[in-house]
């Protein structure tokens, strides 16, 4: 596939890109949604009902993400961004910071971030690394009103205006390691295709998602570096 280096690229990543860094996906065998109920730990209602259960769930994930290292797929995407002359946007559904640890700069975390806390009183976002609980104080309004800065089911994902604009201008849209089951991210391929973008899906297994023109099957840490080398003319 020949893509001019000045043409705009939009990349979407999901939990599958972080699987080889040791972070659990959601819907694979043994995934997070096997061990936890989405309603209990990933909805505003669940947080209201049992905040301590939700704090513990994200404290566990935050501690695991802090120890995790980026894999060759994260590193390849950082190299692609660095070498690309055209517009480049990396949208991630992931809440870990492995893209940033690999050196990616232009990253939009549409589902929030584990290393951030949100004040549900004043709305401020603040960098957060350790455990979070109901007694932690907001650094802006000083009230004990912090929650995990995660976009839960039923809440509006972040940065949708910037995402929609980038999809409308993309020449290439690549989805990596996502099951394509959660909207609005699952609809990005249609927005990109209707704007004339070439659409590519990279996944460990054939997803049968025929909305994509090209399907590359393989583990992210192998398939993504190979794909990036091909884009950069190094293959
Ligand atoms: N390499 C490439 N792809 C992989 C790998 C791997 N090593 N391991 C797993 N995958 C693929 C799986 O085949 C699957 O299609 O990654 C995908 C993971 O799918 P999900 O677990 O559904 O994760 P994701 O698509 O990111 O979920 C989207 O759902 O629950 C919400 O907010 C949560 O952001 C998440 C959203």
Image: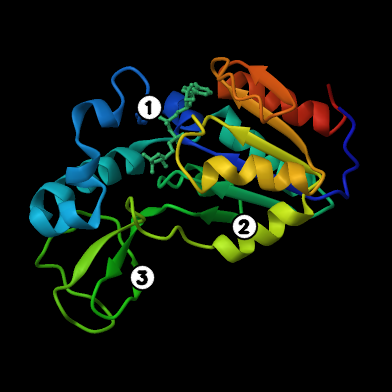
* Tag of residue 22: 1
Q: Assess whether mark 1 and mark 3 are in contact (beta carbons under 8 angstroms).
A: no
Quadrant showing the C terminus: top right
Work out how far the residue at label 2 is from the one at label 1, CA to CA, in angstroms: 28 Å
Work out how far the residue at label 3 is from the one at label 1, CA to CA, in angstroms: 27 Å
Residue with the most extreme bottom position? 141
Q: Nearer the viewer, residue 30 or 227?
A: 30
The residue identified by callout 2 is 163
Quadrant showing the N terminus: top right
At 14% from the left and 74% from the top, the residue drawn is: 144
At 79% from the left and 45% from the top, the residue drawn is: 83
Q: In this rendering, does residue 78 appear at all?
A: no
The residue identified by callout 3 is 125
Q: In the structure shown, which secondary structural element does the residue marked by tag 1 occupy?
A: loop
Give the answer, above or below, for where 208 lies relative to 109.
above
Q: In the structure shown, which secondary structural element does the residue marked by tag 2 occupy?
A: helix
| Quadrant assignment, res 215 | top right
At 68% from the left and 48% from the top, the residue drawn is: 191
Work out how far the residue at label 2 is from the one at label 3, CA to CA, in angstroms: 20 Å
Q: Does the residue labelled 2 lie within 8 Å of ligand 1?
A: no
Question: Residue 168, percent across and down?
Answer: 74, 55
Q: Name the N-terminal-most of marks 2 and 3.
A: 3
Crowd rating for badge 2 (residues with CA inside 10 Å; few <14, some 14–19, many 20+): some
* Tag of residue 172: none
Q: Name the N-terminal-most of marks 2 and 1.
A: 1
Q: Assess whether mark 1 and mark 2 are in contact (beta carbons under 8 angstroms).
A: no
């Amino acid at each position: 596939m020949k893509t001019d280096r000045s043409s705009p690229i939009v990349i979407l990543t999901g939990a599958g890109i972080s699987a080889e860094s040791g972070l659990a996906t959601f819907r694979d065998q043994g995934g997070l949604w096997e061990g936890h109920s989405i309603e209990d730990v990933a909805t505003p209602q669940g947080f209201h009902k049992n905040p301590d259960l939700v704090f513990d769930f994200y404290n566990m994930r935050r501690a695991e993400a802090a120890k995790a290292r980026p894999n060759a797929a994260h590193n390849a995407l950082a190299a692609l961004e660095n070498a690309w002359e055209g517009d480049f946007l990396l949208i991630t559904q992931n809440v870990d910071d492995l893209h940033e640890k690999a050196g990616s700069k232009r990253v939009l975390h549409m589902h929030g971030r584990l290393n951030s806390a949100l004040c549900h009183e004043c709305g401020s976002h603040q960098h957060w690394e350790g455990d979070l609980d109901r007694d932690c104080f907001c650094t802006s309004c000083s009230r004990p009103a912090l929650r995990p800065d995660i976009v839960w089911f039923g809440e509006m994902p972040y940065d949708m205006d910037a995402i929609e604009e980038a999809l409308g201008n993309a020449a290439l849209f690549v989805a990596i390691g996502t099951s394509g089951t959660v909207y609005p991210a699952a609809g990005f391929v249609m927005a990109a295709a209707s704007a004339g973008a070439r659409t590519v899906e990279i996944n460990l297994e054939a997803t049968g998602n025929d909305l994509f023109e090209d399907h590359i099957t393989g583990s992210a840490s192998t398939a993504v570096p190979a794909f990036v080398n091909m884009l950069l003319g190094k293959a």
